[in-house]
Amino acid sequence: MAELSDRMRELVQPHLRGIEPYDPNFTPTKINLSANENTYPLPSGVRERLDAALAATTLNRYPDPMSNSLRDELARRHGVARENICVGNGGDELLFNLLFAFGGCGRTMLTCTPAFSEYQFFADLTQTSVLDIPRDPVTFEVDAARVLAAAPSCDVVVLTSPNNPTGNLIDPALTREVCRVCPGVVLLDEAYMEFADASASALGLLDECSNLVVLRTLSKAFGAAGVRCGYVVAASDIIDAFAAIRQIYSVNVLTQAAALEMVKQRERFSSTVATICLERDRMYAALSEDPRVTVWSSAANFLLVRMANASTVRRRLRDEFSILVRDFSAVAGLEGCLRITVGTPQENDAVLAALDSLLREE
Ligand SMILES: *Cc1c(COP(=O)(O)O)cnc(C)c1O
């Protein structure tokens, strides 16, 4: 990736001098399993209703800043009130806003790596210090004792359940304890929670944990990564803080209309989600029988797989089979690891066959 020019390094704020423009120089492939998107077609009937909703959307007026119709439908989904929800332009915007509001100079965010790289990125942008308590190098479970010991001096705790890229869940009992000892806010990033057992969600703790923030997105289970819609669920005064600092029109009218229609039709997505979970378990079973790879069980729509020559395997999957997966082998603790999104049965069969033939050669 390109660095900033010397001139720009002089002009930007000192703490931003090291950042690089993000342009992933994307290679189109036939099978893209690199970003944990839902690769299935929309459930039948959903696309038609979505198109009708988009066609009926007025474009010359500014959007409703707070996405209230969408908030009401999301509130129905989770059994909370509109006042407990703030919608964002993707979950990523809300992660940035969380650190903008509650982090900053002289403040500390606790994370447990390996984790979603955006946490560190947004901490850097907002000059928030990061306290990393690494996960177990073998199981990737969080070190609960160390997290609980450190949380009392943290302003923001970010836990991910299921975790990206390792697939582990956080026990809600641990979340409750962290909320109890942390004087700041505790974010549970549940971007992949639809693929896990419903009892794993921290949403049920919102009544007793007034500093808990749960993040959800339409990018994964709903197959709407391009729509850019995520939301947080939290106590109403936390939502007020999110509402006070957000870019007021960040969630555009087309996003609001599309998201509203999808959330209304949420029941229709359940069979795709169930199929993805079955496919995940089938892939896991196949890969765990293979002595050439290590695979971790996952509660999400992806699997983390370790092998020899992972970077070469990833490159050859792309160049010889037109299959794109994510290479994590340069990340501390993830040496030799690739992350493979669970796709359709045909895509998954292609991955298993391609991996088998490459692993014979590598
Ligand atoms: C995908 C993802 C998100 C949110 O993604 P958006 O597309 O911005 O909604 C948040 N956290 C994790 C861990 C993710 O993998």
Image: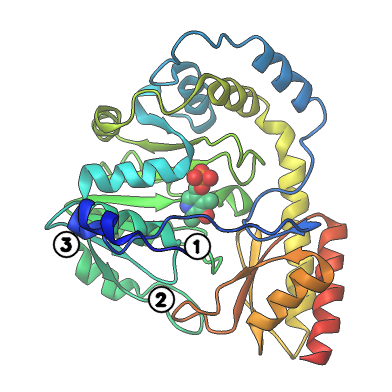
- What amino acid type should be assigned to the residue bearing mark 2? Arg
Where does the image place residue 13, in percent across and percent down from the top left? 20, 52
Instruction: Looking at the image, tell me whether mark 1 or mark 3 is earlier in sequence order.
Output: 3
- What amino acid type should be assigned to the residue bearing mark 1? Asn
Q: Which mark is residue 36?
A: none
Q: State whether label 1 is within 8 Å of ligand 1.
A: yes
Q: Residues within 10 Å of mark 3 (few under 14, many from 20)?
A: some
Depth check, front residue: 54 or 180: 54
Depth check, front residue: 24 or 63: 24
Instruction: Looking at the image, tell me whether mark 2 or mark 3 is earlier in sequence order.
Output: 2
Q: Which residue is mark 1?
A: 163
Q: Say how the picture is coloured.
A: rainbow
Quarter holding residue 332: bottom left
Question: Distance between the Cα atoms at labels 2 and 1?
Answer: 11 Å
Q: How many marks?
A: 3
Q: Which residue is mark 3?
A: 152
Q: Which mark is residue 135?
A: 2
Which residue is located at x 66 percent, y 88 percent? 309
Question: Distance between the Cα atoms at labels 2 and 3?
Answer: 19 Å
- What amino acid type should be assigned to the residue bearing mark 3? Pro
Check contact, mark 2 vs mark 3: CB within 8 A.
Answer: no
Which residue is located at x 56 percent, y 8 percent? 58
Instruction: Looking at the image, tell me whether mark 2 or mark 1 is earlier in sequence order.
Output: 2
